[in-house]
Image (cartoon, rainbow, N blue to C red):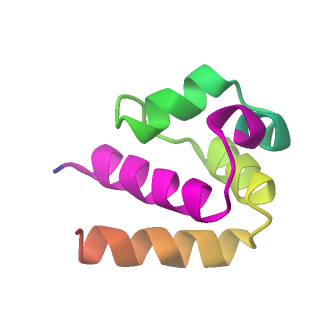
Amino acid sequence: MNHNQIFGKALRQLRREMRLTQEELGFESEISRTHISLLELGQRSPTFDSLLKISIGLKMDLSDFLIFLAEKIRAPD
């Protein structure tokens, strides 16, 4: 599994834990639902801007979001 796929799986997990649809996360993050979907599928690489927007949409500090992602990359499911 590559880093984009690990990121996508982690993003989907967080989004579902917060009981958000892709549409809701996209709205809160100011990112299209389609882009959220492509990130979750591992078909797009997140930019710093999108990481920041997604952390805002998830109502998480960017540092906490990055720590969560780093843990997933180190020990993927």
Above or below 17: residue 54 = above
Q: Residue at x 63, y 51 (%)?
A: 51
Residue 20 highlighted magenta (yes or no): yes
Q: Outermost residue toward the front?
A: 19
Q: Residue at x 46, y 28 (%)?
A: 38
Q: Residue 25 is drawn in which quadrant?
A: top right
SS majority, magenta: helix
- Please give the range of residues in magenta: 2-25
Residue 2 location (% of width, % of height): 21, 48
Residue 75 location (% of width, % of height): 24, 77
Residue 52 highlighted magenta (yes or no): no
Left/right placement of residue 13 relative to residue 47 reads left
* 17 or 7: nearer the viewer: 17
Q: Residue at x 48, y 51 (%)?
A: 12
Quadrant including the C terminus: bottom left
Left/right placement of residue 6 relative to residue 64 reads left
Above or below 42: residue 63 = below
Q: Outermost residue toward the left?
A: 1
Q: How many marks?
A: 0
Left/right placement of residue 60 relative to residue 72 reads right
Q: Residue at x 56, y 41 (%)?
A: 47
* 38 or 3: nearer the viewer: 38
Q: Residue 16 is drawn in which quadrant?
A: bottom right
Q: Residue 70 is drawn in which quadrant?
A: bottom left
Residue 17 location (% of width, % of height): 59, 65
* 47 or 8: nearer the viewer: 8
Residue 35 location (% of width, % of height): 57, 26
